[in-house]
Each structure stands twice: as structure tokens, then as C-alpha cells.
Amino acid sequence: MTPREQRAALLGADVIAQIHDRVALAPAPGPDVIDELRRILTRPAGRTTSTTTVPAPRAA
């Protein structure tokens, strides 16, 4: 059973329909929200790729 099927079995068709109705009422996100989400999803935890390597500290 897929996770989607499990949720459907737990919640039931009526609850899922109510969730879909509420989501449909929500306004679309603005461009600032989209930009912020793109930044977060493309660089989770602020990580960026670096072209330079930093040597690891040596153990004592």
C-alpha cells in the first residue's frame, strides 16, 4: 500500500475532499514567496557549492 493509499484509508474520502476544498480556497503565492522557496529548495541550509577547497584541520 502506497503512502497516499494509507492516508486515504486513515482519513476517509470526506476528510480528503474537505482538505482539497480548503486548499482550493487558498490564494496563490506571490512572486516573493516563490523566489524564497526556490532559494531554500535549491540551497537547503544555506549550502552553496564552492569552487575552492578548504583543507580539513589536522588531528593533534
Image (cartoon, grey):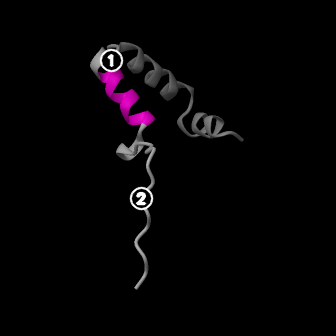
Q: Amino acid at mark 2?
A: Val
Nearer-N-terminus badge (2/1): 1
Count of picture labels: 2
How far across and how far down the image is residue 26, in percent? 34, 17
Q: CA distance from mark 2 to mark 1?
A: 39 Å
Judge whether 36 appears above or below 7 on screen.
above
Image spot of residue 30 (x, y percent) = 29, 15
Residue range corresponding to the magenta coloring? 33-42
Q: Quickly name the residue at label 2.
A: 54
The answer to whether residue 5 is visible is yes
Which residue occupies the foreground of this view, 10 or 56? 56
Q: Where is mark 1, residue-wise?
A: 29
Kindly identify the residue that appears in the image at 48 percent across and 28 percent down: 15
* Dot 2: element: loop
Instruction: Point out the frontmost of discs 2 and 1.
Output: 2
Residue 3 vertical position relative to residue 26 in the rendered view, above or below:
below
Identity, as a three-letter code, of the amino acid under mark 1: Pro
Local crowd at mark 2 within 10 Å, few (<14), some, or many (≥20)? few
- The residue nearer to you, when weighing 40 against 28, is 40
Q: Secondary structure at mark 1?
A: loop
